[in-house]
Image: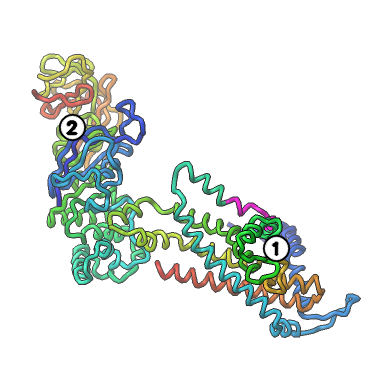
Amino acid sequence: MNKWSDNRAWWLVLPVVLIVAFSAVIPLMTVVNYAFQDTFGNNEFYWAGIEWFQEVLRSDRFHGALGRQFLFSFIILSIEIPLGIAIALAMPKKGLWVPFCLILMALPLLIPWNVVGTIWQIFGRIDIGLLGATLDGLGIEYNYTQNALDAWVTLIVMDVWHWTSLVVLLCYAGLQSIPDAYYQAARIDGASKWATFRFIQLPKMNRVLLIAVLLRFMDSFMIYTEPFVVTGGGPGNATTFLSIDLVQMAIGQFDLGPAAAMSLVYFLIILLFSWVFFTVMSYLDRAES
Amino acid sequence: MAKIELNGLAHSYMPHIQEPQDFALKELNHVWEDGGAYALLGPSGCGKTTLLNIISGLLKPTHGEILFDGEAVTNKATEGRNIAQVFQFPVVYDTMTVYDNLAFPLRNRGVGASEVDGRVREIAELLEMSDSLKRKASGLTADAKQKISLGRGLVRADVSAILFDEPLTVIDPHLKWQLRSQLKHLHKRFNYTMVYVTHDQTEALTFADKVVVMYDGAVVQMGTPEELFERPKHTFVGYFIGSPGMNVVPCHIDGKQAMVAGHAFAMEQGLSNIPAGASLEVGIRPEFLSLTREGSGPTVSIQKVEDLGRFKVASVRLEDHEFKVMVNEEDDVPTDGARLVVDPTHVNLYANSHLVEEA
């Protein structure tokens, strides 16, 4: 068959090119532009080179936010992943309770972020919130607006409440895909519950766990709305994570140059970590087969 | 190894049993000898997997009991029954090596390391897998995985029975034959009691000493391959075993002959014990019919001839009834004026689908 020598078909791609350019490429390039230039207003720009990057990477403020961000992601991953697996294992495999459990699990995922934030913001208040008032009534000192530890605990519990379901649903799907024959073979081989988990369930879940870890890492690393609504980054800057810091810098202080440089660094960190996660975990996956 | 007794075994998946049709497995009584190789043969949904699951302890029968060497195990869980099972799809522990897979059942039972090592190496030798002991099990081919499944049963020196649930489904045809002969060999050498579920008659007939044919939740016949071929006890066995299956046509009896569409078929057996009022059929295998131009047989018209290589199958018509006739490859099929010749020693009479036997 002869190839068509007519290249007019390329015009069909034009709408996509325009939309992507308008919504992604041009805004991103604008950020890149800001990152390498300085302005004193009047829409006049001067070349700044890597000055903003140096400033951001050397600033204590950035180091602090980055550290808090990593700590937060680490804590919620180390709670949500094991808890999600445990809940998925405990869920019924068949019967009337299955849809009930699935709906119950899906509910938190359906609530918009700022609503989740608002719920917990009120829930935790000692004057009118059920949680805050109860703790206060029990004589436990709890005040997330003034105590940094309380603020952290509140945010972590909230994130676990909001997102463990995602891990549960992914793990549950992984568990449901294991044929009955595996469990029968394990019984015939006299395997204990732990051995069944270790040698059948966990290996069969490792693909969905890879996805769960990646999604939860990326999402938690970019978390903004909930801490913004609940603590606003406080007390002090105890819960000022990268995105909150970034917004303060870009919109609060209108420091476009450093904010743009920080966005790019932030973006590269997420990209790097996701890539490392993915490479390591798919390497482990391949090493097994 | 153990003798397996099934006493009044029946099973229904329904909570409220109302009629006999609610039973997935209808009442059966059998004794399977220690060291025997049995095949459960039947179409999908005939109850063979139900029966296997009852033996392995995954299902508790609605009625009846099951005994291993005289000891009732009906209420024992799978892990207490000391059986091994090879499933339809290979089940291996992906993250373990072949060695660890084979050692797994022993380690779970707290067997000492040196004994485990000895057993694993012995079984690997037996299965011709000694070279791949260090490999990860997940990367192996389907037939190697099935061998590991089998090996996990064999390492336990004291298994009561080895159960196979259509184990060759996912194996390539040329390897099926190899694995089957390896199984036969193992059976001869160690005298395991083996129960093999399949819907493939070739597999059943080559593997087993005794074939148990199941149909619609009931065992219709248990016998050697020869018995199933020559004296099918139910028309279903006639259809199901043999290729092509048995010719079964309605008839009535006149003296010592079966009359089919006004033509007499001589018979040598099964005439003295016909239940009154039953609907009667004769069953003749295509192998025991032939076509000639001479003689006194009824004239038939040839519908079509299929050449199957070593033999031909002619479809012939006698009035409203169609017969399949097996013809040797080198023989010609007469195109017109063909007469049907029946071997009277191999004509079976069926009353309500069940073989009429001499009293």
- Mark 2 crowd level (few <14, some 14–19, many ≥20, 10 Å Cα): many
Disc 2 versus disc 1: distance between alpha carbons?
80 Å
Rendered position, B113 above or below B346: below
Residue A107 lies in magenta, yes or no?
Answer: yes
Whole-percent x and y of residue B127?
22, 62
Residue B341 in view (yes/no): no
Residue B114 placement (x, y as % from top left): 20, 72
Question: Contact (CB < 8 A) between labels 2 and 1?
Answer: no
Q: Is residue A17 left or right of residue B216?
A: right
Q: Residues within 10 Å of mark 1 (few under 14, many from 20)?
A: many
Identify which residue, A30 or B51, lies in the foreground.
Answer: B51
Specify the quadrant that holds the C terminus of chain B: top left
Amino acid type, mark 2 = Pro
| Mark 1 secondary-structure assignment | helix
Where residue B104 sits: x, y (%)?
28, 63
Q: State whether discs 2 and 1 lie on one chain.
A: no
The answer to whether residue A248 is left or right of residue B16 is right
Q: Is residue A65 visible?
A: yes
The label number, if any, that marks residue B232 in the structure image: 2
Q: Chain of mark 2?
A: B
Give the number of the disc on residue A230: 1
Q: Which residues are magenta?
A: A106-116
B91 or B323, nearer to the observer: B91
Question: What kind of colouring is applied to the model shown?
Answer: rainbow
Q: What's the amino acid at mark 1?
A: Val
Chain of the residue displaying label 1:
A
- Residue A188 quadrant: bottom left
Instruction: Report the mark closest to the observer, 2 or 1.
Output: 1
- The structure residue drawn at horizontal position 73% and vertical position 78%, both measured from the top left corner, is A261
Instruction: Say which of B142 and B176 sits in front.
Output: B142
Q: Residue at x 19, y 20 (%)?
A: B298
- B65 part of magenta stretch: no
